[in-house]
Amino acid sequence: MGTPLGDFIRAKRDSIQPEQLGLTDHGRRRSPGLRRSDLAGRAGISVEYLTRIEQGRDRNPSLSVVNAIADALSLSVADRTHLHHLAKITGGACAGRTRPAPPDRVVRPGAAATLRLLEPGIAVLTNGLGDILAHTSGFALVTDGTGLLDDDTPNLTRFVFTDPRARSLFPDWDTVADELAFDLWTGPSRDAVEWFSADLATLAGPEFTRRLNLHTPPPPSTLRVDHPSGHRLRLDRETLELVTDAQRVVVYLPADEETAGALDRLRSEHSRHRPGGLRLVA
């Protein structure tokens, strides 16, 4: 007996021609669409495992397998969302589980006091999901006009993977994306990370999901920022882990004299238009 998940995957596979995915058409097939072996190869799973999922004999594929199949089929955002829903009601990928409580967004007085000492420098308090909990006026200055802080609950990870402005802001976008995906492995809880990742995967697609299971820490690097005002910044980063809260303070320091001068000009340009001081977002 099939399942909604297996039926959907098989239907999508049957509707896709190999050339749509850049694959070689090997001639006549017994059924239309993509061969099971082609889909399994693209998803990095065995043909036997894919067969069990399609036939309903395996009702508990992991979130990483569901994401891999979505990537292999090049699903749209709407189809990805539907695939995750079917996985849940079929019995896999978080099925039957209650959404965990979100990570604590409370900013302790000590953490806030630490950020105040860093004014007017560039510093931000985040958790392992990339939620921005508090930031200095310097951080607001560097991100002004980018859209990052426009949300009531800004999240750096979501911004980088879903907002096209992030690619203009970060010339080394791939490196930044690798870092943020890896940071999820040190998130506040495994359950919270899985739910956050499942939600983000439907929007961000393969650029996010293929990085999620790399498990390889990116090498340290200087962050390059192309500010909307035209200033080009190179920033070194120092991270202070707040172990008791699963939160961290990231301090951004100018990596060269050119960046230091650009930051001074930015402060001068914005001093009359934007109030200074620490901002608590949480």
Image (cartoon, grey):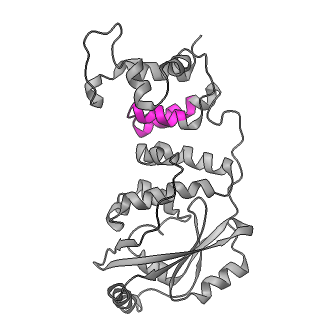
Front position in the image: 164 or 186:
186
Residue 282, by quadrant, is: bottom right
Q: Is residue 26 left or right of residue 154?
A: left
Residue shown at 33% from the left, 13% from the top: 32
Please tell me how many numbered marks the rendered image carries: 0
Instruction: From the image, give the main secondary structure of the stretch colored magenta.
Output: helix
Q: Position of residue 247 (x, y in %)?
A: 65, 68
Residue shown at 55% from the left, 87% from the top: 277
Q: Position of residue 178 (x, y in %)?
A: 45, 56
Front position in the image: 221 or 153:
221
Q: Residue furthest right?
A: 244
Report if residue 206 is visible in the image: yes
Q: Position of residue 272 (x, y in %)?
A: 40, 92
Residue shown at 56% from the left, 33% from the top: 85
Q: Indicate whether 210 appears above or below 21.
A: below
Q: Position of residue 83 (x, y in %)?
A: 51, 31
Residue 238, by quadrant, is: bottom right
Front position in the image: 75 or 72:
72
Q: What residue range appears in magenta?
A: 65-86
Report if residue 203 is visible in the image: no
Q: Is residue 46 left or right of residue 169?
A: right
Q: Indicate whether 13 appears above or below 131.
A: above
